[in-house]
């Protein structure tokens, strides 16, 4: 991949190849881009639950999109279905149990 077509306005950060697609964080635009191997944007995954960096991690057959300072995260399946999850079971800002971050 040499160029990203249809990307956001921010600087592209961390990248991960998962299930034949490329996922690239765009923290300044609070999104993760899902791209095909040619660099064409297939999906924009909003990550506006916090300001700051977003991390990508492959774990247990899924791609985990984690906002370390936010209360939510996302799980991407091998079929590219996206599920938003709440990280804190108490509904607050503090970690009672963090189900995404390690």
Image: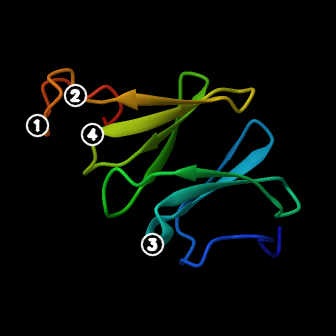
Q: Which residue is mark 3?
A: 28
Q: Earlier in the sequence, mark 4 or mark 2?
A: 4
- In the drawing, does residue 102 fall left or right of residue 91? right
- 46 vs 15, left or right, is left
Mark 2 / mark 1, whichever is N-terminal: 2
Near-viewer residue (89 or 25)? 89
Disc 1: CA contacts within 10 A as few (<14), some (14-19) or many (>=20): some
Assess whether mark 1 and mark 2 are in contact (beta carbons under 8 angstroms).
yes
Quadrant hosting residue 94: top left
Q: Earlier in the sequence, mark 3 or mark 2?
A: 3
Name the residue located 28 percent from the left edge and 47 percent from the top edge: 70
Is mark 4 in CB contact (under 8 Å) with mark 3? no
In the image, what residue occupies the spot 36% across and 49% down?
A: 67
List the residue tagged with mark 4.
Answer: 71
Mark 4 touches mark 2? (CB < 8 Å): yes
Going from the N terminus, do you reach mark 4 or mark 3 first? Answer: 3
Counting from the top left corner in percent of width and height, residue 74 is at: 48, 36
- Disc 2 is placed on an element classified as loop
Q: Secondary structure at mark 1?
A: loop
- Coordinates of residue 3 in the picture (x, y in percent): 80, 75
How far apart marks 1 and 3 lie (CA) works out to: 24 Å
Give the labeled residue for mark 1.
94
For label 2, the crowd category at 10 Å Cα-Cα, with few meaning under 14, some 14 to 19 and many 20 or more, is some
| Residue at 54% in and 77% down | 10
Give the spatial CA distance, label 4 vs label 2: 6 Å
Position of 81 relative to 69 (above/below) = above
In the depicted structure, whether residue 79 falls above or below residue 25: above
* Alpha carbon separation for disc pair 3 and 2: 24 Å
What residue is shown at x 61% (from left), y 23% (from top)?
A: 61
Residue hosting label 2? 88
Q: Is residue 87 left or right of residue 21?
A: left
As drawn, the label of residue 81 is none
């Amino acid at each position: 991949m040499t160029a990203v077509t249809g990307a956001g306005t921010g600087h592209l950060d961390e990248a991960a190849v998962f299930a034949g697609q490329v996922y690239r964080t765009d923290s300044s635009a609070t999104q993760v881009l899902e791209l095909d191997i040619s660099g064409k944007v297939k999906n924009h995954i909003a990550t506006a639950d916090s300001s700051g960096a977003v991390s990508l991690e492959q774990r247990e057959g899924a791609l985990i999109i984690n906002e370390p300072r936010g209360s939510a995260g996302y799980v991407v399946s091998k079929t590219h279905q996206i599920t938003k999850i709440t990280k804190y079971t108490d509904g607050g800002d503090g970690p009672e149990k963090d189900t995404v971050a390690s």
